[in-house]
Amino acid sequence: MTTVTRSNRRATIAVCATDQGLPVEIRVDRQELRYGAAALADEIMRLCRQATLEAGALRREELAEAGIATDVLDRLGLPTRDQVVTQETHFEERETAPTSWLRPV
């Protein structure tokens, strides 16, 4: 099973997911709870999608090295490295920001 862990910029949320999209580990720092359940869920889902894409590309590379033909890999739906880069740009543009930049005192 190929897994990848992705975290947000502040490293306060981390999601480890398989190439099939199954999250196998989620870590959340307590300070993220102040933004509410919806914002936290959105961020977890975004990180899970990113980890899944990266794990899929890694799995594709592993299978290609094992001699699996490109057309078979395409039919499996495993992303290429270029597709991951394109999606990463899209994810970065939509990355959720905190609802407030104020810190508790």
Image (tube, grey):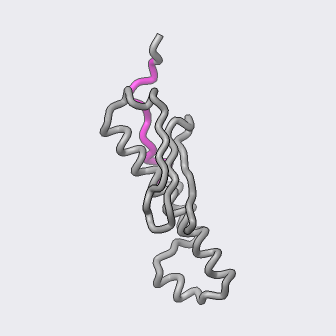
Q: Is residue 80 left or right of residue 66?
A: left
Does residue 81 show up magenta in the picture?
Answer: no
Which residue sits furthest top? 105
The residue that appears at 43% across and 31% down in the rendered structure is: 32
Q: Nearer the viewer, residue 52 or 22?
A: 22
In the image, residue 75 sits, relative to residue 61, either above or below, namely below
Percent of width and height locating residue 51: 52, 57
Q: Is residue 39 left or right of residue 6?
A: left
Percent of width and height locating residue 39: 35, 38
* Tag count: 0
The residue that appears at 49% across and 58% down in the rendered structure is: 17
Which residue sits furthest right? 65
Main secondary structure type of the part rendered in magenta: loop
Percent of width and height locating residue 29: 49, 32
Q: Please report the bounds of the magenta region as a residue range.
A: 91-102
In the image, residue 91 sits, relative to residue 83, either above or below, namely above
In the image, residue 78 sits, relative to residue 97, either above or below, namely below
Percent of width and height locating residue 94: 43, 47
The residue that appears at 35% across and 44% down in the rendered structure is: 41
Q: Is residue 32 left or right of residue 79?
A: left
Q: Nearer the viewer, residue 40 or 74?
A: 40
In the image, residue 55 sits, relative to residue 31, either above or below, namely below
Q: Quadrant of residue 49?
A: bottom left
Quarter of the image with the N terminus is bottom right
The residue that appears at 46% across and 77% down in the rendered structure is: 77
Does residue 99 show up magenta in the picture?
Answer: yes
